[in-house]
Amino acid sequence: MLTRRDLALGAGALTIAACTQTQNKAEAAETKTMTELSNTDWANMSEREWQEQLTDMEFRVLRKEGTERPFSSPLNDNKAEGTYVCAGCQLPLFTSDMKFDSGTGWPSFFTVIEGNVGEKVDRKLFVARTEYHCKRCGGHQGHVFKDGPQPTGLRYCNNGVALDFIES
């Protein structure tokens, strides 16, 4: 019979595992030099190589075009100045002055760093949407909508787990 104690111990173990995986990713990122990042053949990395580099949730979003739960990313409420980079390859995608609070539960931006984002049509929900991805590694970031603020009128609705933030 499953007891509350068993459930609490299991939840604790899952939390420790998740924290360890995130810490290991951070440590691995610190050891990669800019030369290693620029010399990586991002387009030809195997699924196994991506799984070794990313957390489970990052892999699901970046490589399998998944979506994280709204309001689950600390980056949604981030107000610090800096640069938002792809969690897969560290390519700069947005700056903090491009960010706005859309109220949707995902980090949102009204424009992108030119040349660093690609787009394609996504018909998974039976309606055509514009999906965007990191131009260097192809990692799925989110979808762009035409309900954002001026000057562009666009809302790049991004999965927070697909981004890392570098404070300036």
Image: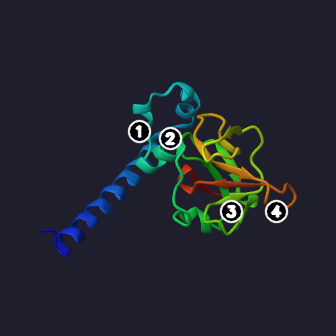
Q: Earlier in the sequence, mark 2 or mark 1?
A: 1
User: Helix, strand or loop at disc 4?
Assistant: loop
Instruction: Give the residue type at disc 4.
Output: Pro
User: Helix, strand or loop at disc 2?
Assistant: loop
Quadrant for residue 34, please give it.
top right
Instruction: Give the residue type at disc 2.
Output: Lys
Check contact, mark 2 vs mark 1: CB within 8 A: no
Q: Earlier in the sequence, mark 4 or mark 3?
A: 3
Q: Earlier in the sequence, mark 2 or mark 3?
A: 2
Q: How far is disc 2 from disc 4 in space, using C-alphas? A: 29 Å
User: Helix, strand or loop at disc 1?
Assistant: helix
Instruction: Give the residue type at disc 1.
Output: Gln
Relative to 50, 11 lies left or right: left
Image quadrant holding the C terminus, namely: bottom right
Residue 87 lies, in percent from the top left, at 54, 46
Q: How far is disc 4 from disc 1 in space, using C-alphas? A: 36 Å
Spot the residue most to the bottom: 4
Decide: few, some or many residues near mark 3? Use Cα within 10 Å; few <14, some 14-19, many ≥20.
few
Check contact, mark 2 vs mark 4: CB within 8 A: no
Image quadrant holding the N terminus, namely: bottom left
User: Helix, strand or loop at disc 3?
Assistant: loop
Q: How far is disc 2 from disc 3 in space, using C-alphas? A: 30 Å
- Residue 81, label in figure: 3
Instruction: Give the residue type at disc 3.
Output: Glu
- Residue 149, label in figure: 4
| Pointer 2 residue | 64
Instruction: Tell us which disc is closer to us: 4 or 3.
Output: 4
Residue 29 lies, in percent from the top left, at 47, 44
- Residue 51, label in figure: 1
Instruction: Tell us which disc is closer to us: 2 or 3.
Output: 2
Instruction: Tell us which disc is closer to us: 2 or 1.
Output: 2
Relative to 105, 36 lies left or right: left
